[in-house]
Image: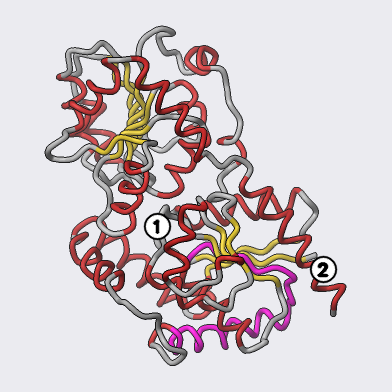
Amino acid sequence: MKALILSISTGQGHHAVGAAVANSFESMGVSCTTMDAYEYVDPKLSKLLSKGYLLSTAHAPWLSAKAYDALVKKNSPYGRLSVPQLTNRYFAWDLNKYVQKNRPDIIVCTHVLSSIIASVMRAHAWTNATTAGIVTDFTVHPLWEETRDLDYYVTPSELLDFQMARKGLDVAKILPFGIPIRPQFSRKTDRAEARHSLGLEADLPTILLMSGSMGYGGIDVSTEKLDALSLDMQVLVVCGNNKEMYRKLKRKKFKKRFDIYAYVDHVDLMMDAADCIITKPGGITSSEALAKGLPMIMVNPIPGHETRNAEFMLNNGIALYATHSFPLEEAVFSLFKHPGRLEDLRATIALYARRDAARKLCEFLMQRAAARRAED
């Protein structure tokens, strides 16, 4: 059996989800190929999209937010001859050359744009592969309504069924397995053991402060606010790929213990050691924290999908959301003032945590693909 993972280069999260799915497929003996759909069609287009996304989120987030909000406010689904459909029909025709040559049994898409391409191929019967699109946020991007010909939709929660139905999508196709994450985030290391491994104080309240893989999020301001608090604590700070921020924080003098890291590959262990995480509410990081049962304080969301992620988690009682009127230092104070608050959050998180999403998805799709092959 063969699987094709189609991603798009807008941030690292979509590729991380694709890698989690691919690793799970391969562990089950499925031959798996991962591809950036736009890069295959036109490498220049892929680079333009990637750079445009990074520049807009870093320097003009208001612009992407306005475009996102305009799409959200649209009241009726797109027609079959919409601009997204026509554009991606061209991309689908080009990508279909690869599909016809390699004939995958399963196509999994980790981005709404690659999902539209797969939907077009299914609509025109260019492939008989079992297709699935993964919603990688706790909200439904406006363009998902363009994917109505996919076989399945993977969502982080059944609470998104309402949004999916409003977009004219078939709720019977929804698989609320959760966002696929790396297997180490589905396992738990004892907190004392994790702190010992990281050289941390065993009994000191511990915070993990992350800025995301690209290093955005005003993390230096957050460290100043935490250092000024009267609470005794230790803080793990992950700067991601922001080397300038890493150097700046390494030079900084703190009153409290701040362990400063650049990019790391053991965030799972850090989560096990922490009492809470302060981070941007990206879909993948949030899913990893939920799987670890780790309370979150959300900061600096990218306007648009991350703002809606924050609203979802705040409204469902699984995280705190630091804002101008409820600043970070107040959020931390309120969380640690009463230890029972942390326990309450962990209990609620348990209702929404989705562990082993990648394995469940791969097993399901393999069964459906085998059944379709038998029918043919």
Task: Tell me the SS state at disc 2.
Answer: helix
The answer to which of 162 and 72 lies nearer the viewer is 162
Residues shaded magenta? 85-111
> How far apart in space, not on screen, are marks 2 and 1 (Cα)?
31 Å
136 versus 92 height, above or below: above
How far from the left and from the top, in percent, is residue 359? 68, 48
Q: Quadrant of the C terminus?
A: bottom right
Mark 2 crowdedness (10 Å alpha carbons): few <14, some 14-19, many ≥20:
few
Residue topped by disc 1? 139
How many numbered marks, from 0 up? 2
Task: Tell me the SS state at disc 1.
Answer: loop
Q: How is the image coloured?
A: secondary structure
How far from the left and from the top, in percent, is residue 84? 41, 83
Task: From the viewer's perspective, tell me whether residue 210 is left or right of residue 355.
Answer: left
Hey, what amino acid is under mark 2? Answer: Ala
Hey, what amino acid is under mark 1? Answer: Thr
How far from the left and from the top, in percent, is residue 8? 47, 66
The answer to which of 360 and 277 lies nearer the viewer is 360
Mark 1 crowdedness (10 Å alpha carbons): few <14, some 14-19, many ≥20:
many
The answer to which of 283 and 142 lies nearer the viewer is 142
Quarter of the image for residue 153 reads bottom right
| Residue name at image x 39 percent, y 45 percent | 213
